[in-house]
Amino acid sequence: QMGLTVEEVAQKSAALHEFNPMLGFRGCRLAIVYPEILRMQVRAIIEAAINVKRKGVDVLPEIMVPLVGNYKEFVFCKKHALEVIEKIFNEQGMKVHYKIGTMIEVPRAAITADEIAREAEFFSFGTNDLTQMTCGFSRDDAASFLGHYVNDTDKQFYDYDPFATIDIAGVGKLVDMAAKLGRSTNPNIKLGICGEHGGDPKTIAFCDKVGLDYVSCSPFRVPIARLAAAQASIAAKKAK
């Protein structure tokens, strides 16, 4: 249908092969090189929101641009998203409220969060990737040595698995810094985390301490997360 031969498709596939995909051609980088992917996804999100609104359910879609490390990447993606959204509103004769924000999962994004926050309406800290890139650990491969770092009393470099509970001294410092920088240029920015850490009680207590607005976690961990959030709130009130 596209007028391409099998050989041409195979060559394209080979050209896109990566030795380290985790640090490769993914996230907003795909949207920058192939904006049509972003435009398609934004269209799907906003049209779905309008369809649901027509059925009487009010929704607030949040479009999150992943893997941003430079505010210019976010500006580029936001521009394309806004163009598509306005086009859909004109086509459908209906509007919905929405937010456009980003994942803070690249250390550079945390360090330059004040620049990104001028354009973003929310940050969601992607602590899985932020931990990988800050500590230099591959989440998929660290099991072969991380146990020695955590469980061996002679070499206990970490008190707990940094992929289960946030590394407060390292990754946590970046989260705290990014939250402060973000609010310095955008006081109304919404801040939260997503990933496995979002259901961990110690991490939730840390998030409450640095002033994050929400945590996101898998459905199975919601009861634990709610309890931990309540305990953190009570502890903070007692401390005051």
Image: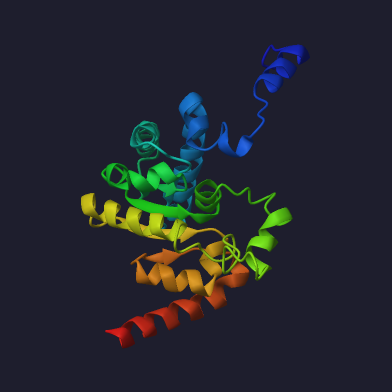
Height in image: 173 above or below 203? above
Q: Position of residue 182 (x, y in %)?
A: 29, 52
Q: Quadrant of the N terminus?
A: top right
Q: Residue drawn at (42%, 70%), measured in percent from left and top?
A: 206
Q: How is the image coloured?
A: rainbow
Is any part of residue 61 visible from this angle? yes
Q: Position of residue 142 (x, y in %)?
A: 67, 52
Q: Nearer the viewer, residue 229 or 155?
A: 155
Q: Quadrant of the C terminus?
A: bottom left
Outermost residue toward the right? 6
Please tell me in which quadrant of the rendered image residue 112 appears: top left
Q: Residue drawn at (59%, 60%), measured in percent from left and top?
A: 163
Q: In the image, 237: left or right of 152?
A: left
Q: Nearer the viewer, residue 135 or 7?
A: 135
Q: Position of residue 24 (x, y in %)?
A: 57, 33
Q: In the image, 101: left or right of 43?
A: left
Q: Position of residue 145 (x, y in %)?
A: 70, 55
Outermost residue toward the front? 154
- How many tags in the picture? 0
Q: In the image, 174: left or right of 201?
A: left
Height in image: 55 above or below 72? below
Is any part of residue 100 visible from this angle? no
Please tell me in which quadrant of the rendered image residue 158 appears: bottom right
Outermost residue toward the bottom? 238
